[in-house]
Image (cartoon, rainbow, N blue to C red):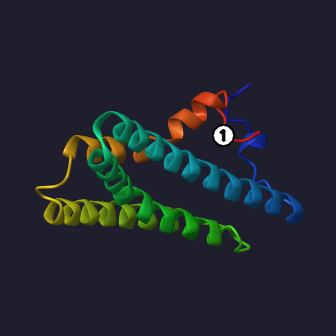
Amino acid sequence: MSVFAASETDHIELSEQEKQQVARRARRDLIRIFMCQVLAAAAVAGLFGLFSGLGSAVSALLGAACYLAPNAVFVMRLMLETFRPQGSGVRTFLVGNGLKVLVAIGLLWILADQGAGRLDWFAALMGLVAALKGYWPGLLFSGGRLVR
């Protein structure tokens, strides 16, 4: 038997209740992932504050905010799309993600320009990395799944 049997490529129709259930789960997962990113950034900022002082903690928070702010808008946009009957499309995701990256780069540029002498760059970059990869601790502590 072929791996790609006809029954596996047939179009699957979801009931209205199943569509709503998938949309609710998507909204919950979006919020959970974003909250993991926020918590990871806050933890890194707290560690910098504990070991390097308030200036480093603020730098870590500013670095994280350069990603978290546009990501929050992107998450809200995706959540709003889940209320549409047809759901979110690939175009919404790709365009939104591209805009998020461009805005994050712009915010980092502004941060570099405005905080040139006062910014702890190592802390800012670690805050940015924590925000970017903050979903990994969520996956680690949930056994590889953010949903239960």
Q: Which residue is mark 1?
A: 146
In the picture, the quarter occupied by the C terminus is top right
Q: Residue 116 appears at what percent x and percent y?
A: 12, 58
Q: Residue 25 appears at what percent x and percent y?
A: 74, 53
In the picture, the quarter occupied by the N terminus is top right
Q: Quadrant of residue 122?
A: top left
Kindly state the secondary structure of the residue where label 1 is placed: loop
Q: Residue at x 46, y 60 (%)?
A: 71
Q: Residue at x 70, y 74 (%)?
A: 84
Q: Residue at x 66, y 40 (%)?
A: 146
Assess disc 1: are there few (<14), some (14-19) or many (≥20) residues with their C-alpha within 10 Å of its C-alpha.
Answer: some
Please, is residue 108 above or below residue 125 in the view? below
Residue 95 horizontal side relative to residue 105, left or right: right
Tell me the kind of residue under disc 1.
Answer: Leu
Residue 81 horizontal side relative to residue 17, left or right: left
Q: Residue 4 appears at what percent x and percent y?
A: 67, 35
